[in-house]
Image: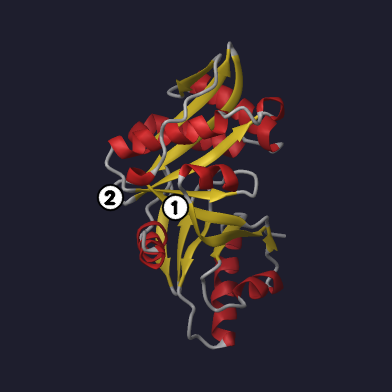
Amino acid sequence: MDHAEVLAQFDRDMREGARPDGPGAVVEHAEGVVRQIGSEQGWNGVLWSQLSGLAEADVDAVITDQVRYFTGLGREFEWKLYGHDRPADLGGRLRGAGFTPEPEETLMIAECGELRLDAEPPEGIELRPVTDRAGVDLMVDVHEQAFGTDSSQLRHQLLAQLDADPDTVVAVVALAGDVPVSSARMELTPGAGFAGLWGGGTVPTWRGRGIYRALVAHRARIAADRGYRYLQVDASDQSRPILGRLGFVPLTTTTPYVYAPR
């Protein structure tokens, strides 16, 4: 894999050429940025920026414009900053404008044909596709236990996707008997070269048994069957070693900078 070439393609496909991530969302090309406007429960934010070469005052003006725009909509929003974005001090400028950085993650990419896809769930674990409201309830239950966060936004997004265009999302829950213990999803953007792995999480008492690895392999096989060349994931420090053993490589970092209207 040519890391620089793949990263440039990722920027073109998934950021500069981003498509809406669900029903009702709109992607706009504004001055210097590409942004998504979703519902109050959906994802709102800046996906890509082209600020290199601008004067410092002009960079700050673009940031101010986005704050004014989303604040006018009454939306909390995220500026998704990548390690190779320019100018190099953009993160500091976002903090100065009132954004709060969340934990840094690593953008990891794998070529489907190069992955080790033989990982199977451990004995007693069933992987079940999520196709209806009952499955979404199971998935949300796992997500809240695994990450300790409210998952109402995830519930809204999944139900909307499954209702409007189920071919754009693959969701799966791992069950130990009738008990949901792990879950994950995959976003499939039509026309893009990358399928995105999101939300993989296991409840604390079931970690370290290979379930997360099996969920990655399961989704990767589906992506390959549907003709996607690459998989991408924003990896936490916890998942990065597992993904590395499967064949993913780190290309850059990504940090969500969040702005909440006062």
What residue sits right under mark 2 in the picture? 191
How far separated are the C-alphas under marks 2 and 1?
A: 18 Å
Q: How many marks?
A: 2
Where does the image place residue 257, in percent across and percent down from the top left?
63, 61
Quadrant in the rendering for residue 98: bottom right
- Taking the spot 57% from the left edge, 22% from the top edge, the residue there is 138
Furthest residue toward bottom: 55
The colour scheme of the drawn protein is secondary structure
Q: Quadrant of the C terminus?
A: bottom right
195 relative position to 203: left or right? left
249 relative position to 41: left or right? left
Where does the image place residue 60, in percent across and percent down from the top left?
60, 79
Where does the image place residue 54, in percent across and percent down from the top left?
50, 85
Where does the image place residue 222, in percent across and percent down from the top left?
35, 33
- Taking the spot 56% from the left edge, 64% from the top edge, the residue there is 81
Question: For the residue marked with disc 1, what is the amino acid?
Answer: Ile
What residue sits right under mark 1 in the picture? 109
Residue 250, compared with residue 83, is above or below; it is above
The one of 22 and 144 positioned closer to us in this rendering: 144
Mark 2 touching mark 1, by CB under 8 A? no
- Taking the spot 40% from the left edge, 37% from the top edge, the residue there is 220
Of the numbered discs 2 and 1, the one sitting upstream in the chain is: 1
Quadrant in the rendering for residue 253: bottom right
Question: For the residue marked with disc 2, what is the amino acid?
Answer: Gly
The one of 150 and 235 positioned closer to us in this rendering: 235
- Taking the spot 51% from the left edge, 56% from the top edge, the residue there is 107
Residue 149, compared with residue 63, is above or below; it is above
Q: Quadrant of the N terminus?
A: bottom left
